Image: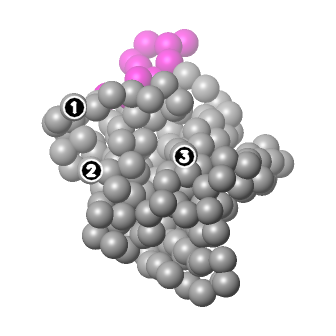
């Protein structure tokens, strides 16, 4: 729990230094998420890595917001791309099978406020990318969850394009 809290605080503190919007991410009961199952790590270590790396994705997205915008995100569920299958031989690690039927999904609630504290956007989203294996994706190298990262970037870009989220 302490690592998660430290990661969340770090993301919130580092965001203003980049002269961008500020994001605060809360991971609500990650032990109950649909799928953040590890393949070759302990559950706690993998869960911490997922929240840390996806937290960095949110921090990157906040850089695209005006300087005075505060964005609060509560992630309520995550279903990573793929499906974890147990290996049949003892002592072997499980494997994550990536197929187009196991698309990434994330449920979240959010609120954005401007410098005066006025709510400029809020909502509850069930974000998914059912075509995650189609098209071009260029891994950023910032996360090992490239499908989820692309899904979040595409969702955020659409929100800005549709005028729901402010742009710099």
Query: Which badge, 3 or 2, is on the more N-terminal residue?
Result: 3
Mark number, residue 136: 1
Numbered disc in front, either 3 or 2: 3
Residue 20 can be seen in this image:
yes
Residue bearing the label numbered 2: 129
Disc 1 + disc 3, Cβ < 8 Å: no
Q: Residue 19's x, y, as percent?
A: 66, 53
Q: Earlier in the sequence, mark 1 or mark 2?
A: 2
Q: State the CA–CA distance, disc 1 to disc 3.
A: 20 Å
Q: In the visual, does 11 lie left or right of 51?
A: right
Q: Name the N-terminal-most of marks 1 and 3.
A: 3
Badge 1: residue crowd in 10 Å (few <14, some 14–19, many ≥20): few
Magenta residues, start to end: 86-97
Q: CA distance from mark 3 to mark 2?
A: 19 Å
Q: Could you tell me which residue is drawn at 66 percent across and 77 percent down?
A: 115
- Judged left or right of residue 4, residue 92 is left
Q: Secondary structure at mark 2?
A: loop
Q: Main secondary structure of the magenta part?
A: loop
Instruction: Report if residue 93 lies within the magenta region.
Output: yes
Q: Nearer the viewer, mark 1 or mark 2?
A: 1
Relative to residue 68, is residue 129 depicted above or below?
Answer: above
Q: Where is residue 121 drawn, in percent x and y?
A: 47, 79
């Amino acid at each position: 729990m302490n690592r998660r809290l430290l990661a969340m605080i770090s993301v919130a503190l580092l965001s203003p230094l980049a002269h961008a919007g500020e994001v605060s991410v809360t991971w609500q009961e990650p032990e109950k998420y649909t799928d953040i199952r590890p393949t070759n790590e302990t559950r706690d270590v993998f869960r911490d890595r997922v929240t840390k790396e996806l937290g960095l994705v949110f921090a990157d997205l906040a850089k695209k917001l005006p300087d005075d915008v505060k964005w609060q995100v509560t992630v309520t569920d995550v279903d990573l791309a793929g499906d974890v299958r147990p290996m049949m031989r003892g002592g072997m690690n499980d494997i994550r099978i990536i197929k187009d039927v196991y698309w990434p999904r994330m449920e979240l609630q959010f609120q954005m406020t401007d410098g005066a504290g006025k709510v400029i956007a809020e909502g509850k989203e069930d974000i998914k990318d059912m075509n995650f294996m189609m098209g071009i994706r260029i891994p950023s190298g910032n996360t090992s969850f490239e499908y989820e990262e692309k899904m979040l970037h595409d969702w955020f870009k659409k929100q800005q394009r549709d005028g729901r989220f402010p742009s710099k």
